[in-house]
Image (cartoon, rainbow, N blue to C red):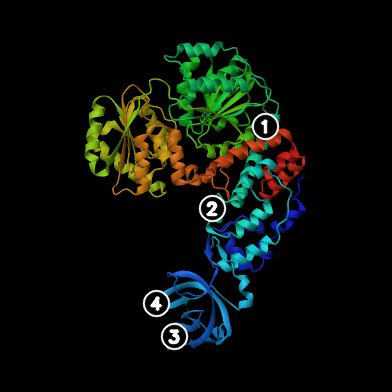
Amino acid sequence: MSTRPEPLFPLFAGIDTLDGVGPKVAKALEKIDVTKPRDLIFTLPYSGIDRRRRGSIQGVELPATMTVEVEVGRHLPPATKTRPYRVEVRDAQTTFQLVFFHARGDWLKRQLPTGQRRIVSGKVELFDGIGQMVHPDHILPPDEADDIPNFEPVYPLTAGVTQRVMYRAVQSALARLPEPEEWIDGPLRAQEGWPHWRAAVEAAHHPLSLDELSPTAPARQRLAYDELLAHQLTLALARSALRKGKGIETHGDGRLRRKVLSSLPYSPTGAQERALEEIAADMGRAQRMNRLLQGDVGAGKTLVALMALLVAVEAGGQGVMMAPTEILARQHLEGLRPLAEAAGVVLELLTGRDKGGERAAKLAALKAGDIQILVGTHAVFSRDVAFHDLRLAVIDEQHRFGVAQRMELGAKGRAVDVLVMTATPIPRSLSLAQYGDMDVSVLDEKPPGRKPIATVLVSAGRMDEVVDRLRHAIGEGRQCYWVCPLVEESETLDMTAAEDRFRQLRAALGEGHVGLVHGQMPPRDKDAAMARFVAGESAVLVSTTVIEVGVNVPNASIMVIERAESFGLAQLHQLRGRVGRGEAASTCLLMYQPPLSDGGRRRLEVLRETEDGFRIAEEDLAMRGAGDLIGTAQSGLPKFRVADLERQSALMALAQSDARRLLADDPTLESDRGKAARMLLWLMEQEKAIRLISVG
């Protein structure tokens, strides 16, 4: 079924086919991502107004929104243009006024003929002891009063669209709803008390009270679940397509891994051993591995990655480890080389910098199988790079490698096992949204010998003390990072802030002691400054946030973060994780500019209280919301119209197990429920999933 099912055609027609939507309104609706009736159906009201009929405005605490039947009395046109036009009206108990600014008298006389009865609805306020309704929202003859709902939904708007236009367009879209077969599992729907799809949409757009607007209302919950289920079905289809690709069974005999472990001064943590078992078992299966290794700063992901690569080498194959930047690729190389040497394994680096004869020699060695583990950047994917027998790709994920790229890696025709590593602890609901197509191993213990980092809050006024403290630490041979504030999304301003601070610190601490790195520097200068710091030639590295990702300098034991309140929690946690990697006790100084906002204070306090990245991530999600947390633009995080990832994380987990179960029972979606699920995928515009089924 690779064409859209006919019952959905009316929902995918032009938005201008709806009542009251002309070219101007259609253009305005585009701003809130509404381009067809389907989008309007999933744009739910966020609030509501009680418009139930009352007998009188008397005895009600004002101001209040009221709907009453009145008899129209005299018209009081304004004496001057700047004054309002007033109309006296009488309800069952008292008299009050309807007030209009810039009104046309002839129009008002037609709307409100003296002596006739009308239903009026709007906000009533007391002014000089007289009740006034300024610009009523509704004025209708009593026989049309049913047009005013008892509880009127309030929709999100954009310039050029009024509530009335929106309401009318939505009603017109609702008239087109099909009655699809049920795609939710019967027992689950009964247990949750969810209505059928069409009834749920109708109920969500016609709430009877504020309770029915909450994410926990059955109709809303059901519609949220539909979105999450469609998303998880897409991920599950991607996962099974990847698994269908025949994998290679890779069984290592453990000899190289034993050599590495015996060369280490400590034993792996329980979490590392567990992750290694899961990975080795996956590599030994005939299906391709697609696993995420999630670990907090300093949880020891590198060791796990190397052990996985060694399984490939033990089996006579090769492994590749990809990093997002050259600095990180070199770091992986430095971290892995001594361990690889202990096992007698040949490890090489390939980046965009390799040119000419050197590059040709590496490529020849790779093709011949002489290089067993390759570390590199995306350059590893160039056309001319050929492996002798590639078994495993480890991708160091700094969020720049979404589902699409993971699928692309699979499409290279190599049945390679894939292990993605991320150092950002992600709350479960988000990791399911982002990595639902993968199996997950979590490293939630710190290796022995990792010392806690003392985290201190310091007001910006105490800058001199901080500089003194650095002078003292440098005297003891220690190193320090100094991270400059984030300046309003502007890299040039970021750069100036960093350069100013660099000059001040150089004047205070001595010429040769201070290095500088920022985003605007040519890569070569940046690498050179980093290299000097890594080699211990400079004692203080002033930088913008360039350094948060993966940098490893064990001798650095102080981290100063200026204007810490302007950073997100996860980012502060990542930055702090750059210290505490060596023998010395480490400190992270969070410098803030008073007065702190409540959110800013809460963030800094959470950081002071805990080093547990998962707890920090959950807090961050609660405080900032899902899109901000991962920067939705590059996160591969879907945009949901109804579902709320923060409040409905349990639904996401349910949707994942449901989707996987449905596909296990019915891989091509041919059963009754499977066919209904296809309709859901079309409705939710999951074209990628639909392609996967038609290919499958």
The span from disc 4 to disc 2 (Cα, nearest Å) is 35 Å
The span from disc 2 to disc 1 (Cα, nearest Å) is 38 Å
Residue at numbered disc 3: 81
Q: Amino acid at mark 3?
A: Lys
Instruction: Check residue 214 in the rendering and tell me which mark sits there, or answer none.
Output: 2
Q: Is tag 4's residue or tag 1's residue first in the polypeptide sequence? A: 4
Q: Amino acid at mark 1?
A: Leu
Residue 631 relative to residue 313: left or right: left
Q: Residues within 10 Å of mark 1 (few under 14, many from 20)?
A: many
Total labels: the figure holds 4
Q: Residues within 10 Å of mark 4 (few under 14, many from 20)?
A: few
The span from disc 3 to disc 4 (Cα, nearest Å) is 21 Å
Residue at point 66%, 51% (across, down): 195
User: Is there any visible trace of residue 490 in the rendered image?
Assistant: yes
The span from disc 4 to disc 1 (Cα, nearest Å) is 70 Å
The span from disc 2 to disc 3 (Cα, nearest Å) is 45 Å
Residue 354 relative to residue 285: left or right: left
Label 2 element class? loop
The mark closer to the camera, 3 or 1, is 3
Between 211 and 60, which is closer to the camera in this rendering?
60
Q: Is tag 3's residue or tag 1's residue first in the polypeptide sequence? A: 3
